[in-house]
Amino acid sequence: MCLKGGLMSNKSRDRIFIFYLYAAALNAILCLIDGLWVSSSQTQISLLSNSLATMGHLLFALSLGTLFISLIYQSKRSNYVLALSLLLLSGPFISTPFIYSIARHVKFFDFITQMNNFNFLMNSGYAFKTYFFIINILQLSIAGLAILFIKHDVTRFYELRDYSISNKRILLNGTFVASVFVCSFVAYIIGPLYLLHAGLGISYDQGNIISVEKTFSRNDVKIVLLPMAHIGDASFYQSIVSDYSSQQAVFLLEGVKDQKGLIIKGDLFYSSLAKTLGMAEQKGQFKFPKKTTIRFVWADVDVSELSQQTIDFINLLSVDKNSDKGIGLEHLGQISQMMAKEETSKIIFSDILNFRNERLLTKLNEELTKSKLIVIPWGAAHMHDIEMQIKKIGFEPTLEVKRILTQVWRGNDRVPASKIQ
């Protein structure tokens, strides 16, 4: 049926659509200019990037409104607005696979600290750069064409007709909108899971958090990357001890030391957290028998080598050695303030990840001429960068073993999990 009056006149709807379309077209033009500038000069224009951020929030709000209006009131012009609204609302979700594909080629530290930085995304991944230009050209094309249809109502562009309401069309459009959002949301969820599995060696399966142990080979030398966590099921640590105790291997051990005993004020909070969750702590369960063929090599740094900001951060994560209490609220507030400062957070992450990984790789290179089997049981956050580096020197993946790190839903009644074959 045709609707000439109703809650809103045709002219009012046209004005809303026109304002929205002009804003979208302007945003697309500025985005393209920004993208071309970043691609050619490797820098950003701060005024332009700040303006685009503000416009992005405005367009998001407008897209929600026009999406609702164009779902109910149908015509050729509203169909273009519907398409543009969907494009703008689902764009960030659709881009997730492209953004996370960048993580395969850059250091994990760089990715987690700069993944929202447009300059970083444009210069780190060809896939994202291509996506960005396609999405903005589409936005500009749809907005421009819709403006022509609404502003220039001539026969060759548009057959003049009032907006209409059709239950069948509302159902059809609603189904299409729902499908787009479901697909986008799935992509948005799968992206982080993909990063955890492919980059860090952690995945989720049937109520279990899984550590994916990866073996890399070059000629007759093997390197095993074994993603660890400070707390987990006791069986996780015990299964590793059982599997490797009798093997001729070298373990490159993680663990920041405080050899002078003057810097770290307490123990990290993992012990109290493990008790709260009914889990085991790594240092209590990851113990090999005295009679073992394994050779252990410490491959980490001393606290005295870290920056003062990182030392302060570690102390905030520490609890009194004689107390079972967790981290106090005042410490959590200080941690939040510290990580909110961009430069401070970069220094801390660089120390915790990059600097320690460099020390580990130095020890690894020393052991490559001495050992045929080298096991690296380090925290999962370190695995991505280490894997990238060993692939550069010719090591190829040959085997994966899945181990249950913890059974999530068992709580305090958690039963020790066995190794997945």
Image: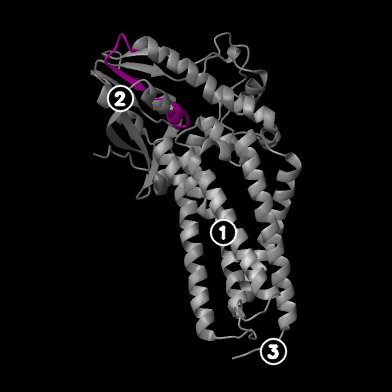
Disc 2 designates what residue? 241
| Disc 1 and disc 3 in contact, CB within 8 angstroms | no
Q: Which mark is residue 4?
A: 3
Q: Please identify the quarter of the rendering in which residue 350 is found.
A: top right
Q: Which residue is the extreme one toward the bottom?
A: 1
Q: Nearer the viewer, residue 255 or 327?
A: 255
Amino acid type of the residue tagged 2 in the rendering: Val
Q: Nearer the viewer, mark 1 or mark 3?
A: 1
Q: CA distance from mark 1 to mark 3?
A: 31 Å
Q: Please identify the quarter of the rendering in which residue 214 is found.
A: top left
Q: Residue at x 74, y 80 (%)?
A: 11
Examine the structure image and report whether residue 349 is included in the region drawn in magenta. no
Q: Earlier in the sequence, mark 2 or mark 3?
A: 3
Q: Earlier in the sequence, mark 1 or mark 3?
A: 3
Element type at mark 2: helix
Element type at mark 3: loop
| Disc 2 and disc 3 in contact, CB within 8 angstroms | no
Q: Quadrant of the C terminus?
A: top left
Q: Is residue 187 above or below residue 248?
A: below
Amino acid type of the residue tagged 3 in the rendering: Lys
Q: Which mark is residue 120?
A: none
Amino acid type of the residue tagged 1 in the rendering: Leu
Q: Nearer the viewer, residue 327 or 359?
A: 359
Q: CA distance from mark 2 to mark 3?
A: 77 Å
Q: Is residue 126 above or below residue 354?
A: below
Q: Is residue 117 visible?
A: no
Disc 1 designates what residue? 138
Q: Nearer the viewer, mark 1 or mark 2?
A: 1
Q: Residue at x 74, y 40 (%)?
A: 46
Q: Position of residue 80 (x, y in %)?
A: 59, 70
First to last magenta residue range:
368-385
Q: Is residue 339 left or right of residue 205?
A: right
